[in-house]
Image (cartoon, grey):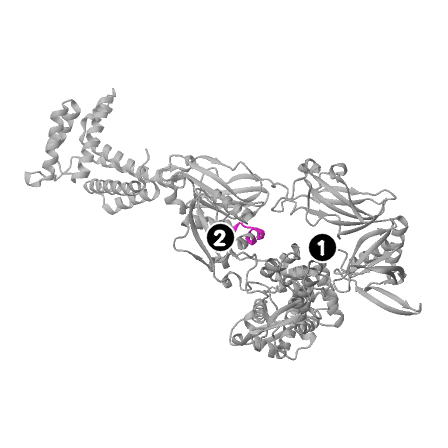
Amino acid sequence: MRYPPWLQHHLGAILVALISINVLQVSWTGGFHPLWCLIVWAWAWFKAHFIFVLACGVTLSIFQRASSQSPDLHSGLDPPWDGSKVLKGLAIALLINVHDLWFVQWSSPSLESGIETWLGGSCANGWQRVVEETFVCIEPERGLRRPVGTSWSWSGILFTWILSIIAVLICSIFAASRFMGLKKERLFACLVWPTDLTASSTKTVVITFNSLSMDVQQIIDRFTAAARCEDQSVSAFVSPGPGFNQLHLVFSAKQSGRYQIHLKYNNHFIKGFPAYVIIQPGPIDPMATIIGGMKSQMIVLTGHEPKSIFVRPKDSFCNAIPPDRLADLANDFGIKLTAKLGDESVNLKTIHIKNVIYHVDSSDALESILAFSPGHEGWYKAALTYKDQIIPKSELTLLVLTVKEMADVNRFMESPHNIPTFKGEIVAQHGINLSRPRLFYLTLNTRQLVLKEYFLGLIPLRLCAFRLMPSTKLSLVAYKKKSIPVIRIQDGFQGHPEVVLKEGNVVAALFHLLLLKKIGGSESFQDKANFFYDHLLRYYKKKGYTHRRLPLIIQRDDILQSSLRATKFFTDSDWCRLFEIEFMGEPGMDLGGLRREWLEIVCQKLFHPQFGLFTNLEENSEAVYPNPNATKAQSHLFKFAGKIVGKCLYECAQGKSYRQQLPIRLTRSFLAQIVEMRVEFRHFADDAPELYASKISFIQNNVIDSMDLNLKFIDEEIDPQTKSVRVVELKPGGNEIPVKEKNKLEYLDLLAQHRLARRIKDQTQQFLSGLHQLIPDSLLTLFDESELELLLCGCRHYDLNDLKLNHIVIRTGPSSVTMQWFWAALKNFTPEQFERLVQFITGSSRLPPGGFGELKPLIQISSNGSRGGLPTAQTCFNVIALSEHASYKEFEQALFVALYEGNEGFGLV
């Protein structure tokens, strides 16, 4: 039988109080001190459930009264045993005991004889006497007599206390295995694991308790959950289930492996726990699958030389697929080849990895071997596929050489200073074919690729020079006469000439291998970063600079100016020393924390738009770039900013304990200029997303001749002095040149050059002069703009604690359970999922430099009034509205659906 919770809470206390009063009276009559009785029964109450105390108290009282006042019980227990007398004696004792509890034990022989008559068969007469005597007990003026003595025997009292002591001992011995009056071994009826045991953000275990007399909701805070996977702690928590006796245990299950799940109540394990479960890797995610066996996106090989490519399949949480599943997956992987034949690209057949798999016990990858027969040399594009879907970052360029060409390449690589001059023709420039090919000579060394011509066959004239750096690209345009390659050379600046070279394959292979050697032998970011740090330390070691400590006294309330004064006369060697920061008037020794704090505060103040040195391209943009309206008087600050960025990079090179990431984000276009790359209009997508969506992308993707856009080769900007609008021509006579379909790309390019580069040319030069004072430009050019951002800022970071401190819950917001589930879900989010959440709420995945606290308005959490629905968002006001759900699993699933499919139809504003 199940009782309402309020009755469970109060009935027990009432019964225990009544029993305790009765036992106190018994013990007082028997000569025992009531304090001792209180201690005994308080101990019993503390160690067991009220039902157990009630049972003990009633049993003791019945036997005590029966043993002293019921001759039937004694006679019934004597041989031969008479069950009817025993039951009759117990019933008399029970009724008298209950009567005494209510009426404070006023003695009445008539009452006792009335009960005996009632039980003996004369129900009417007996019941009438019981009622009469009861009312007599209520009215003392009717002459009831108070007992002055007792006929209880000392043996009866001793028997009572022996039973009491035994009850207390039982409570003490079995205290750790008691739960709400039930043994923990019998607490739960079943434990149901989710049917899908593959890796996911969370898993929910449903626990249904057996004969639980109290609603789980009221005692949920007494449960504690914990989980471990392969000796690593993972988050876990409990929440009420749909039934009053059900509990949901939710744990993070991103990592595959053996999980150990703990569930405790009042710090005691419940039987069946710890429980164990094996979580398998989830379905293969092409985005997370790793391609191995190559250090570059271009592979140089000969026709008869096989090349191995390894595929390491992973799920969306980067769990490796176990080797015993690889053979079954081979059918789903393939390599798609595209060959350039003449002016056309021809798709060749897809080669399935199943034909070339080499599976051994220790292997964690699929191996594919590429080999080309003689006569099939040339340039190929390759991409690995999974179920006909191209795996990201698996695109390859295969340059297949003849045996003779490979021999020449190997010989030149052994002595790169002896690379000969190659003769060719320029057939196109700036994307326009020349009416007559232009003869040129190409030279290649470890620093640059140079095109030159000879005036009168004697005087060399340089046409263009391309630095040997990752931003310089050589690509195949077509074949002339089916075998001579036409190669485009481009670095973003010099008109990307297209050249015909008979030895074009050799030149392309040499350029690639020399560049690969220059950047450390690998194009992967981590390898290039290690190469950068290693060569930066070698560079300063040759100069004799050391990382010795250099004390700096800084004034916290004027940190920027005091830092400028402290470093005003620093030499390059001083900037390379380890700054030991002391904040004026503050105790503390700098063991690294004060230095990191100083660098972070200086960066935040120096690069913050409010300071005026740097600004945003758009109001809601996170990234900053030099303020085009900065005055010449601020030029020294740009140089100082460059030194601070260089200092951060230099400290990172010293090791992880010195690492200092830049706490601000620079625009991609500005980063491109730092690594000497040309800005492009595609940079607007990152730096000014609103402008890109409303104007740049529209012009690029639409035929504009039929539209009345009234665009000309001009740009408008506001004069900071007069606040008037000023018209700037993007090219000579631009005010008279309309933008048409044929010249729209030129317009977009010139617009990007003006807004992203020319306007900040002087500020950029000052910044670079400070940066290059610490970091050689040759090392910076190892990276592209995206890699430099990763090197400077690290991975994009979302701080959950920051969000908890900087949000608003609207008054009519979600329930407390839904809010608990919301924070629990966010705690288990991957960085990519957190990025989607920020994008869903604010419309942008980027946060301001100050994090969630600088969002205007702050993120607001409300309820959308539905049950079982999807979360909705109002991006204009940074609002997310949550729905109520019956379980955490349903809530989490709805949240994921909204984040991954919520581009439309989910209340986005």
Q: Residues within 10 Å of mark 1 (few under 14, many from 20)?
A: some
The location of residue 734, given as percent across then percent down, is: 69, 68
Q: Amino acid at mark 1?
A: Ser
Front one among 712 and 500: 712
Is 443 rendered above or below residue 869?
below
Judge whether residue 249 is colored magenta: no
User: Secondary structure of the magenta portion, mostly?
Assistant: helix
Numbered disc 1: secondary structure: loop
Q: Which mark is residue 524?
A: 1
Point out the tag, 1 or 2, that comes first from the N-terminus: 1
Give the CA distance from mark 1 to mark 2.
Answer: 38 Å
Looking at the rendered image, the disc whose residue lies closer to the viewer, 1 or 2, is 2
Determine which residue is flagged by label 2: 873
Can residue 324 be seen here? The reply is: yes
Q: Which residues are magenta?
A: 827-835
Numbered disc 2: secondary structure: strand
Q: Which mark is residue 582?
A: none
